Image (cartoon, grey):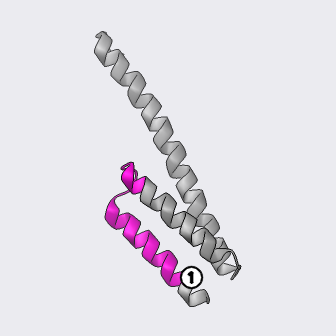
Amino acid sequence: MPNIKSAIKRVKVTQTKTLQNSIKKSALKTSIKKCKEAIAAKSDAASDLYKLTTKDIDKAVAKNLLHKNTAARKKSRLAKALNAAK
């Protein structure tokens, strides 16, 4: 444990941000999973879920939770699956 006041604060801030990032990543993974399931079931709501999921992915890129190329790959694969299901 650090002794310096600023270092103690950095530890607390890092823990808080790590928790927030893990919560956001988990929500993103859930969103992607629901979209994949809707596409696999050929649901009518699949295209709406795809739009929401791509929006969530773009938000994750803006918050530096995902690399932009990873986000592009995930969106591309979802779009490809959606188009194949139609």
Query: Residue 32 location in percent, x, y?
Result: 56, 64
Label 1 sits on what residue type? Leu
- Rendering quarter of residue 39: bottom right
Is residue 64 covered in magenta? yes
Query: Mark 1: which secondary structure?
Result: helix
- Residue 52 drawn at (x, y percent): 56, 64
Label 1: few (<14), some (14–19) or many (≥20) C-alpha neighbours in 10 Å: some
Say if 32 sits above or below 22 in the image: below
Whole-percent x and y of residue 26? 55, 51
Q: Tell me if residue 2 comes above or below residue 20 in the rendering.
A: above
* Residue in the picture at 60% in, 58% down: 30
Residue occupied by mark 1: 82
Query: Is 23 included in the stretch rendered in magenta?
Result: no
Q: Residue at x 59, y 61 (%)?
A: 31
Give the answer, above or below, for where 14 lies relative to 24. above
Among the 4 quarters of the image, the one containing residue 14: top left
Judge left or right: residue 52 versus residue 43: left
Q: How many marks?
A: 1
- In this view of the protein, which residue sits in the foreground, 32 or 54? 54
Please provide percent x and percent y for residue 10. 34, 23
Q: Residue at x 71, y 79 (%)?
A: 43
Who is closer to the viewer here, 37 or 3?
37
Q: Quarter holding the N terminus?
A: top left
Residue for point 36% across, 50% down: 64
Examine the residues drawn in magenta and state their main secondary structure: helix
Q: Which span of residues is magenta-colored?
A: 60-82
Q: Quadrant of the C terminus?
A: bottom right
* Residue 46 position by quadrant: bottom right
